[in-house]
Image (cartoon, rainbow, N blue to C red):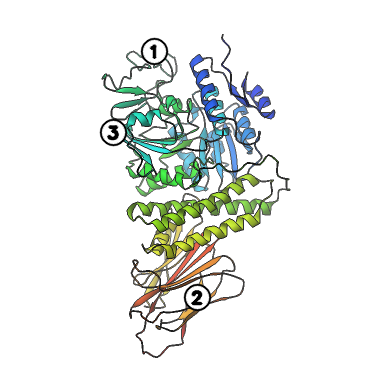
């Protein structure tokens, strides 16, 4: 047998999983030879393209992320856990793993043989971990060498530059994403060009996708074979001929040849891993992609997902905010749930914590060659990391939902604020990842980034006139559904009965409470467990006279106060932003003299550590000459 090809520096062929573990301990990324010359050469070429592993090996321990393995042999899970610096939990079966789902939040990288990852097994896994707010990814492959190869790609550094593209097989068109004015992209160019993220929206199956003048065929080797016996399939696919495209005008391509770090497959049943779930041969889109360049593959787990052309765009927009792949997959399942589909529709093969796109930055995060001093772990510190991690994840979802509104109502001011918010939040997430459970948590820098995020989140209220408050309210509940509805005290302005809604989300953000008046609109929107803003304000606005109000409750963060007309197209005529402290805050707004007598709005938005709370009430503008009313109203 010929020796396998030479690997790039920092990588080495291992003789087995035990040897692989030993190599990893020596800070070398291990690979297992497949015994197939073409596959081994492809492994070497792909790793040379990725470059060395990012950061030290093995990785330092991390909070809120763990590796779960199932089956008879725990070594593959142990290898992944060691490499990624995560705790490892092994169970004989997936059912036993789901009976012990672990703490809520964070992520799980599930390591298992694909034969055990049938849809019957994966739907309960998605449901269980999603209900716990845990992002799920799979570490698997056609065989053990393929799985170890996937782990090596996960460990590799992302390229500093990378664009995204979408191949729409339903229309035969392809496009670059988030690159306005870019030259036209043909499907042939999209297939052959390198991408950070490549999304494919097409008709097809677990084995094939139809891309207009091309077909994507999941053939892994020299010929299509049966999964159990390895027998040739008569008339089956070959490297140059696909059985679904006998016409000479159709070009044949294979997922393992796609030069993309992240591959999204919006194709019915694209992620089908059990050998007998579809046509029982070796032709498989997802497993063939794992055997090639992609370090992550996410896509549809079932055939009734009923996605639209908006779904891949939503994923691309969320990735652009710096969201990790686990969050993107959870959002795809949320969208499916809104269409009435229960149990999940999409799943990820790859690391759920991987963020393929730095937010609006072409430079990789700075690296340090000196290890941070270690701090003793403590329950209080773990709770802090979990809380900050959840808050930044919620912020990413909020930003993505705000970004969705730009597709319908473009607004340069809002777009710029979103860019700045994303940069601040991404910086905080980088700090949290670096800290892990034993490193130093830089509280001062986290607070600075949270303050920066808050400034831009509140700044958009003055930088755009396109219904900024309405956009925020819509984005805050975009990932939530109504858990229960209860009556609340009457509206202080119109005395109509108020309605309180308790909102919850399968994606993990904290539940929210909204209070609404059927006439005056939203009154409160705040995280559950956090008291609403208590506002003592005049009952009316008088042109040319100061409007003074007092706010009780929150002791930290920034508060924006706005007086504005009812129309969302008109800007605020009096506003300010102030820092909160333990004592009550008094705010004086200078009211102009040329106001139209109308029923206006008083808005307050509280931003604290990547979370928002809103308060709104109606205040009439009294005509000039009316006697001032010095009374105040509390709500």
Q: Badge 1: how crowded within 10 Å, few (<14), some, or many (20+)?
A: some
Q: Which residue is mark 1?
A: 232
Of residue 398 and residue 196, the one placed in the foreground of this image is 196
Cα–Cα gap, marks 1 and 2: 75 Å
Q: Nearer the viewer's eye, disc 2 or disc 3? A: 3
| x and y percentages locating residue 363 in the rendered image | 54, 42
Q: Which residue is mark 3?
A: 172
| Mark 1 / mark 3, whichever is N-terminal | 3
Of residue 564 and residue 205, the one placed in the foreground of this image is 564
Q: Residue at x 42, y 88 (%)?
A: 628
Q: What is the total number of numbered labels drawn onto the structure image?
A: 3
Q: Using the image, determine if residue 396 lies above or below residue 518.
A: above
| x and y percentages locating residue 263 in the rendered image | 43, 34
Q: Nearer the viewer's eye, disc 1 or disc 2? A: 2
171 relative position to 94: left or right: left
Q: Which residue is mark 2?
A: 535
| Placement of the N terminus among the 4 image quadrants | top right
366 relative position to 248: left or right: right
| x and y percentages locating residue 104 in the rendered image | 56, 48
Cα–Cα gap, marks 2 and 3: 56 Å
**Circle 2 sits in a helix, a strand or a loop, which is it?**
strand
């Amino acid at each position: 047998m010929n020796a396998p090809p030479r690997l790039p520096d920092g990588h080495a062929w291992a003789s087995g999983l035990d040897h692989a573990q030993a190599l990893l301990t020596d800070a070398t990324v291990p690979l297992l030879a497949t015994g197939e010359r073409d596959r081994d050469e492809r492994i070497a070429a792909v790793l040379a393209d990725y470059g060395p592993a990012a950061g030290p090996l093995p990785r330092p321990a991390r909070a809120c992320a763990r590796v779960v393995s199932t089956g008879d042999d725990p070594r593959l899970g142990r290898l992944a856990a060691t490499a990624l610096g995560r705790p490892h939990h092994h169970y004989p079966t997936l059912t036993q793993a789901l009976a012990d789902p672990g703490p809520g939040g964070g992520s799980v990288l599930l390591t298992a043989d694909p034969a055990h990852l049938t849809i019957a097994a994966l739907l309960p896994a998605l449901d269980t971990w999603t209900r716990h707010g845990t992002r799920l990814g799979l570490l698997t492959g056609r065989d053990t060498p393929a799985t170890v190869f996937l782990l090596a790609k996960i460990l590799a550094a992302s390229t500093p530059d990378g664009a995204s593209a979408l191949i729409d097989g339903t229309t035969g068109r392809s496009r670059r994403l988030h690159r306005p004015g870019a030259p036209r992209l043909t499907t042939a160019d999209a297939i052959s060009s390198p991408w950070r993220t490549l999304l494919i929206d097409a008709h097809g199956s677990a084995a094939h996708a139809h891309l207009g003048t091309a077909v994507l065929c999941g053939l892994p080797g020299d010929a299509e074979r049966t999964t159990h016996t390895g027998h040739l399939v008569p008339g089956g696919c070959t490297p140059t001929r696909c059985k679904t495209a006998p016409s000479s005008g159709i070009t044949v391509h294979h997922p393992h040849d796609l030069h993309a770090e992240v591959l999204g497959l919006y194709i019915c049943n694209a992620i089908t891993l059990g050998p007998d779930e579809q046509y029982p041969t070796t032709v498989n889109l997802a497993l063939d992609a794992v055997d090639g360049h992609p370090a992550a593959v996410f896509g549809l787990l079932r055939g009734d997902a009923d996605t639209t052309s908006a779904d891949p765009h939503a994923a691309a927009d969320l990735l652009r905010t710096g969201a990790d792949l686990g969050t993107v997959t959870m959002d795809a399942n949320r969208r499916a749930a809104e269409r009435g589909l229960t149990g999940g529709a999409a799943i990820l093969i790859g690391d759920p914590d991987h963020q393929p796109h730095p937010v609006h930055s072409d430079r990789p995060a700075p690296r340090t060659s000196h290890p941070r001093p270690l701090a003793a772990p403590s329950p209080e510190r773990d709770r802090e990391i979990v809380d900050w991690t959840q808050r930044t994840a919620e912020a990413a979802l909020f930003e993505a939902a705000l970004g969705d509104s730009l597709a319908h109502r473009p607004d340069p001011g809002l777009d710029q604020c979103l860019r700045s918010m994303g940069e601040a939040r991404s910086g905080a997430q980088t700090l949290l990842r670096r800290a892990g459970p034993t490193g130093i948590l830089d509280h001062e820098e986290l607070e600075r980034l949270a303050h920066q995020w808050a400034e831009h989140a509140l700044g958009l209220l003055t930088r755009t006139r396109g219904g900024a408050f309405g956009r925020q309210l819509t984005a805050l509940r975009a990932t939530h559904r109504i858990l229960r509805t209860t009556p609340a005290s009457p509206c202080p302005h119109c005395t109509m009965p108020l309605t309180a809604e308790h909102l919850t989300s399968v994606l993990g953000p904290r539940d929210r409470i909204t209070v609404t008046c059927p006439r005056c609109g939203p009154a409160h929107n705040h995280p559950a467990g956090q008291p609403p803003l208590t506002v003592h304000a005049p009952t009316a606005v008088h042109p040319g006279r100061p409007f003074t109000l007092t706010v009780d409750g929150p002791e930290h963060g920034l508060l924006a106060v706005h007086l504005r007309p009812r129309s969302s197209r008109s800007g605020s005529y009096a506003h300010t932003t102030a820092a909160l402290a333990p004592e009550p805050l008094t705010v004086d707004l200078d009211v102009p003299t040329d106001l139209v007598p109308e029923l206006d709005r008083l808005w307050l938005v509280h931003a604290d550590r990547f979370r928002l709370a809103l308060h709104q009430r109606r205040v009439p503008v009294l005509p000039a000459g009316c006697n001032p009313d010095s009374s105040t109203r509390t709500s």
